[in-house]
Amino acid sequence: MNKAFDIGIETLAGREAAPAVTPQSQPPAPELDPHALSANSGAGKSFYIETFGCQMNVHDTEKVAGVFLARGYHAAQNSMEADVMLYNTCSIRAKAEQKVFSRLGEWRGIASGKIIGVIGCLAQQEGEDIFERAPWVSLVCGSASYRKLPEMVAELESGGRRVIGLDLETEETFETEITRRDNPFRAYVTIIEGCDYACSYCVVPHTRGPERSRNSESVLSEARRLADAGYSEIQLLGQTVNSYRDPSPRKLSFVELLREVAAVKGIRRVRFTTSHPNDFHREIVDAIDETPELCNHIHLPVQSGSTRILRAMLRTYTREQYLEKISWIRAARRPISVTTDIIVGFPGETESDFEESVTLLDTAGYDSVFAFTYSPRPNTSAAKMADAIPEPEKSRRLAILQDRQREIQIARNQAMIGSTFEVLVDSHHASRGQWAGRSTSNHIINFASPRETLLGEYVQARVTRAAPYSLVGEQVI
Ligand code: 5AD
Ligand code: SF4
């Protein structure tokens, strides 16, 4: 990659993808270099991308937008007037998939004269079948093939009727000349793509391909550019972010990369997600302890509290091994918040397996939990397993687990009353007269302030009230 540009959404015509924040806090964005637009084939045309799914998808959309910008397209004000409409999709659970097809149905009526594309995980999973189910679609591209997007777009521009990119066998990562930055406060940086684990319930290895780590110098130069552009918070992304292995001769480990990103001048906060427990080593906790820029929050999906179910899930660790890692985190000098993902109702999960997931909540003391009912997915080994749990029973377990976690969060959040946190302010709720921002531990604090402009600033906020899912406070001036 010779040139790379990060441009804030505010420099673009279209605003639909921008988060709900007012523009004045946008960090300074470098001007677009006209040379970057030499492949000006899309001049005058516009694109619109709708995103569904995880942070990896959100950031992929920023990069795919960059591909179109580099070809001279501009962001459409709304979907109706776009020449190219893309849907970046998720297929992690069946509900996500259903949503994609119903949304594509809604697009049918406005498809005439436009290029409609489906990209992301469902594109990879369903491939050409998407053309059958939604004939108004003319581009299908899975995330492991995004590096081919410029060629695919060129083919459509020169009159091609249908293009498809489903290549999974790749060692390359997706790097773009330009990345459109839709979040003015937090910049996402992919460090590893794909996944080499084979969890028996999960589509990701099939939809995102094998694990590929990015060259450390490429990551670090992106971080430096972001700092120069005014970003102070970076979130390193990867499906298994801590499995990172630098392919360059420097061969940086994940922890070494963390420390180097944190040392970039101007970067105040570094987050990383998602960590796999198997690659979670004590050095990560040491690095957080020793480096104030590394945020004190770890998302460490456990998936189940039962070793028997973890085995069936092919998670590669036991309950005890997972809890040992939690004990390292709890022994840190800085308090580190921990969040997790849990699946209930995996095939064969007995009442006592489920109970082990509930008791794990108490033992681990999570700050927040994303809990899901198991959803059988195509191409996964769990889909063929016997002893499926009936849907009403899955829902019952989900409710019990969520109720327990709610109680835990009430207690944990109430213990924060009176504490003061530094928050990066990222939104303003005029109707409530409140500002909101995140602490380094990733807690959202809603707070009152006499100040009129605070977006993008780091301020001290003291917690005065706590609910299970929110903290309320006041600015300490
Ligand atoms: N069913 C339910 N939840 C799933 N997840 C992944 N695959 C499935 C599935 N088939 C959950 C896991 C993962 C999160 C992103 O989604 O908990 O960590
Ligand atoms: Fe899916 Fe497991 Fe890979 Fe996570 S580690 S993306 S759950 S296969």
Image: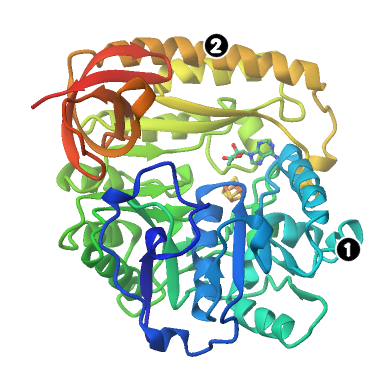
Q: Horizontal placement of 22 versus 103: left or right?
A: left
* N-terminal label among 1 and 2: 1
Q: Horizontal placement of 335 versus 194: left or right?
A: left
Residue name at image x 52 percent, y 80 percent:
72
Taking the image as four quarters, which one is ligand 1 found in?
top right
Towards the viewer: 167 or 84 = 84
Q: Is residue 333 visible?
A: no
- Residue under numbered circle 1: 135
The amino acid type found where label 2 is placed reads Asp
- Residue under numbered circle 2: 403
Mark 1 vs mark 2, CA separation in Å = 44 Å
The amino acid type found where label 1 is placed reads Pro
Towards the viewer: 305 or 390 = 390
Q: Position of residue 277 (x, y in %)?
A: 46, 42
Q: Horizontal placement of 350 versus 248: left or right?
A: right
User: Where the N terminus falls, by quadrant?
Assistant: bottom left
Q: Say which quarter of the image contains residue 402.
A: top right
Q: Position of residue 167 (x, y in %)?
A: 70, 73
Contact between labelled residues 2 and 1, with CB atoms less than 8 Å apart: no
